[in-house]
Structure formats: structure tokens, C-alpha cells
Amino acid sequence: MALQTAGAHAEGAGVFHPQSFTLENGLQVVIVEDHRVPAVSHFIWYRVGAMDEPRGKSGIAHFLEHLMFKATKTIPEGEFSRRIGRMGGDLNAFTAWDYTAYYVKIAREHLPVVMAMEADRMRNIDLSEEAVKTERDVVLAERKQVVDSDVTRQFSEQMAAALYQNHPYSVPIIGWMHEIKALNRQDALAFYQTYYAPNNAVVVISGDITLKDAKALAEQHYGPLKPSVLPPKVSLSEPPHLAHRRLNMTDARVSMPTWERQYVVASAPNADPQDKTPYALQVLSALLASGDTGLLHEHLVHDLNVANAVSVDYDPQRRGPTVFEISVIPSNPSKPAFQKIESAVDDLLKTIDTHLAEDDIARVKTTLVAEATFARDGLFYPGMIVGQTVTIGQPLDYIETWPDHIATVTKDDILAAVKTLKLENAVTGTLAP
């Protein structure tokens, strides 16, 4: 059993102070100790998501997530959730492009039961044709309710499809409707048998647990599981983008028009370890749209009065190339000033050197680090942040040294990061009635 701890830090430094070990079958276990209440969150992360789906089988990762709550060879259908409920626990699951995760929040005394059940369904799900058909209908209804009846979600799907030329991030996580309809029991079992294995999983336990107890429980419940021979990871990249793309979508259901710009940019796992761009883009995102003081918010909402709201988002934690997104809600829904908004965004980015004040940069960096510190409280976010980071291939030290990297971001780093926001790597979209 290999033991790993996040690298040494100055007193009080770091975020979660995780401790990690790996079983002989390849299962990695990470714990974040917090003994303030006798409870834990137990996450199990599988290193497989929508981007790993076979072509033509979109939605199979999410479909299997649903089916994991059916029966195993020892647990009757629906009993997994009922048992957690009877113990006073809370559970859920989610699928992303890069991973699939299942979590339970429970009193510390019930953790052995949770681990026994998770180990069981890692290897022993029992799918009947009727259960598969019923759950496929549930997913189809979810697609209709969550996406097809929501024009903003449809707009997001169209933006992703236009943004990525080669990468599977262009395909919706829930899947395309016509492909979901064709998913069957054999598809689900093939995906499950290929990817659900201890050597393709990470268990993260946050809360009232010690390293000694975690080792003993993991060995008892997960240790006997045999590893699998895993297929090579999907490692598609984007070819050079040669043209700025535009998407103009109209729908009578739209009550709140939107102007949006998405750029393909590097994620943290894709960047060179010495490259500060992912950290600088995080600071830039906050500078542009951190509440009423954000540069874009002030310019579009207060100075020009062409917008009601501005949001900027950058997710550095993806296995593949990620997105830097600027979204604006025009102030006049009946006559949205899309061209004025676009010109103002482009002008501000071109002249951002004159808008960046050292005091603002320092304030934003302090806020980002404070938010990371606040995430230490509670049972959910440590398991969420640590699990996501490790599952996409980042070392534990990425989390622990993240505040230090943010603190070293300079104005020059931010200006260099802005240069990566190239129009040929972007899609500009409008959604209007």
C-alpha cells in the first residue's frame, strides 16, 4: 500500500491537508480529516465521463449513473437509496465530461455499511431489461424537461457544438435525444464492465475519519476487488481554429436575451506546470465580473447602460481544453444592443492594460484565496474539490499550493493571459426572441 501526503507547507498553509494511499488493486483513497462533528462524506469518483463514450452512444455515462441505483446481486432494486435514508444519510450522483461521481453524507458510525455497498455496486450491478427500459424513459423525460423545454440550455448545447471542432466536449453530457433512445442493456453493461473498476476509481472521505481507520476500512471493503485492464484514455485535442464563429439563435420562448462569447483556452492539466496562464485567467475572470466592482460590469451596466448583468466563467479543472466564457444580459429585452455589447467587450479587452489597477488585482486575489479557505468548512466541498482534482489527473499538491500560485499572479501575467483569448478560438452567440 503506497502512502502519499501533500507536500510540506509553511505552518497554516495549504487548503485541505489531504492524505492519500493506494491499495494493491489500484484504488486511490484520499482523506480530509475534520473531527468537529461525527459525520463524513464518502465520494467515489470514476475516471470516466461523457468524453469517453463510444461514438454514437452519447449519454451512456449519464444513463449508467442512473442504473447504478438499481439492483446488485445482493441488494434489491431501489434498496441502496432506502438503506442510506433509513440511516439518516443523504446521497446523490453526477456525471460530467471528465468523470462520474457518487457521494453519501452519513453519520461516522455508518461509514462501513456505505463502503460495503459502494464496493458491491462497483462490481456487481444486476440489470434487468425492464429496469433498463424504465430508466431510459426517465432519462428521456429528463432530457425533455431540463434541455428541450429550456431554450437557454439548448443555446448552451449549440454553443458547445460550435466551439469544439474535434473534442468530445462538443457532445452534451446527457446525450442527444435520438442516441439516448437507442441505448440498451448491453450498452450499459459494456460501459460498466470496461470502466467501473478499483484501478479506475478514487475514494475521497471527508470528515470524522483518521488515516488508520480509512486504511482498515478500505482494505476490508475495496481491497478484495480485482482490477481491470483499462482501455487507453481518450486524448483528443483541438486542431488550430482558423475562423471566428457566430451563432444567432432565435426562439419565441426567450424572455431574457443573451450575448455570449466562448473561447477555447488551456486547462490546468493541459498547461505546462510553469505556465501561469490558468491562474491568471482565474484572476482575470474575477476582475471582469466580480459583483458590482467587475470591470465589465461597471463598463456595460453603469457606464454604457446596455446590460443588466454580466458573468465571466473559467473552469481550469478539465482533462481537455476548457472554456473562458463571457455572458451578458442586455438591459433592453425588446431591443437588445448586441452590437454595442460586443464592441464594448472587445474594446475593454484590447485596452485592459489601462484598466488594471494593482489594488484591484490584490483585492481579487485575496477574495479568491478566502473563498478557497471557506470551502474547507463542511463535508461536501472538500470531497468535491479534492476528488475532481485527483480524478482528472492533477496531484494533491495542486490544491495545496493553489493559493500560493494565485498570490504570485501579476499584472503582466494577466495581460499575457488576455492574449490567449483569440477570436479565431471563439464562438460569439446571441439568443433572442
Image: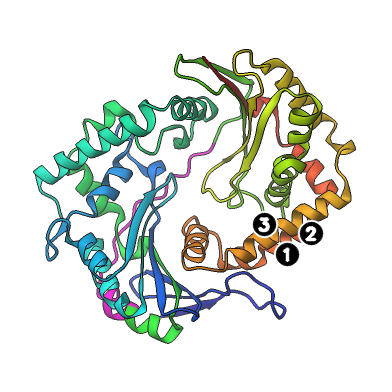
Q: Is residue 226 visible?
A: no
Is the image coloured rainbow, by chain, by secondary structure, or in one colour?
rainbow
Relative to residue 175, is residue 86 depicted above or below?
below
Q: Residue at x 40, y 55 (%)?
A: 47
What residue is shown at x 63% (from left), y 75% (from top)?
7
Task: Give whichever of 116, 392 is nearer the camera.
Answer: 116
Name the residue type under label 2.
Thr
Q: Which amino acid is tagged 3?
A: Pro
Of the residues tagged 3 and 2, which is closer to the observer?
2
The earlier-in-sequence mark between 3 and 1 is 3
Q: Are marks 1 and 2 in contact (CB under 8 Å)?
A: yes
Name the spot of residue 283 as percent of width and height, x first.
Answer: 73, 49
> Which image quadrant is residue 74 in?
bottom left
Dot 3 or dot 2, earlier in sequence: 3
The stretch in magenta equals: 218-237
Identify residue for label 1. 404
> Residue 311: x percent and y percent?
64, 37
- Residue highlighted by disc 3: 273
> Mark 3 or mark 1, which is nearer to you?
1
Q: Give the camera-side residue of 130 and 304.
A: 304
Of helix, strand and loop, which one carries label 2? Answer: loop
Which kind of residue does numbered mark 1 sit on? Answer: Asp
Per the picture, the main secondary structure of the magenta-coloured stretch is loop
- Measure the alpha-carbon separation of dots 1 and 2: 6 Å
Q: Residue 166 in the image: x percent, y percent?
A: 49, 31
Residue occupied by mark 2: 408
Q: Residues within 10 Å of mark 3 (few under 14, many from 20)?
A: few
